[in-house]
Image: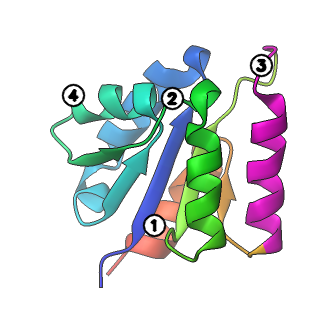
Amino acid sequence: MKKTIALIAHDGKKAEMVGFVKDHIDYLKNANLVATGTTGSYVKQTGLDVELKLSGPKGGDAQIAALAAEGKVDGIIFFRDPLGKHAHEPDIQMLLRICDLYNVPLATNPATGSLIIEGLLAE
């Protein structure tokens, strides 16, 4: 059964996410991908199929958190901008809490993202 990976990136990290996806495309082409709206639209440019949710500030983080709570996502890669201010910070904190509560692997940087992808998707 295919694993489901969620992808989220703050505006200042979207280019880094696309580069990360390109670096791991051989793994990710064998996964179901879901992403917040804007991040997903960038990732789709790599040729991968991505299910788009709302943009993060409009509820996409909450949608992905709901998937995690329902056991419908196997791992989340969320490239956060640690220096930026985000109006939807409560949604971000809720996502982190849900991942901890339901034991869903969560990466907030490329090094950990690589470990999650290789751990979940290596055959």
Image point (82%, 14%), residue name: 85
Image point (65%, 46%), residue name: 62
Determine the secondary structure under disc 4.
loop
Query: What whole-number distance in Å separates the C-alpha atoms at marks 1 and 2?
Result: 27 Å
Q: x%, y% of residue 27?
A: 30, 61
Q: Is residue 70 magenta?
A: no
Q: Earlier in the sequence, mark 4 or mark 2?
A: 4
Q: Which residue is mark 1?
A: 118
Determine the secondary structure under disc 2.
loop
The amino acid type, in three-letter code, at marker 3 is His
Image point (62%, 60%), residue name: 66
Question: Which span of residues is magenta-colored?
Answer: 84-101
Q: Which residue is mark 4?
A: 45
- In the picture, the quarter occupied by the N terminus is bottom left
Q: Earlier in the sequence, mark 4 or mark 1?
A: 4
The amino acid type, in three-letter code, at marker 1 is Glu
For disc 2, the neighbor class at 10 Å (few under 14, some 14 to 19, many from 20) is some
Work out whether 69 lies above or below 84: below
Q: Which residue is mark 3?
A: 86
Q: Is residue 89 magenta?
A: yes
Q: x%, y% of residue 57?
A: 63, 25
Q: x%, y% of residue 115?
A: 56, 62
Residue 63 left/right relative to 22: right
For disc 3, the neighbor class at 10 Å (few under 14, some 14 to 19, many from 20) is some
As drawn, the residue found furthest toward the front would be 58
Q: Which residue is mark 2?
A: 55
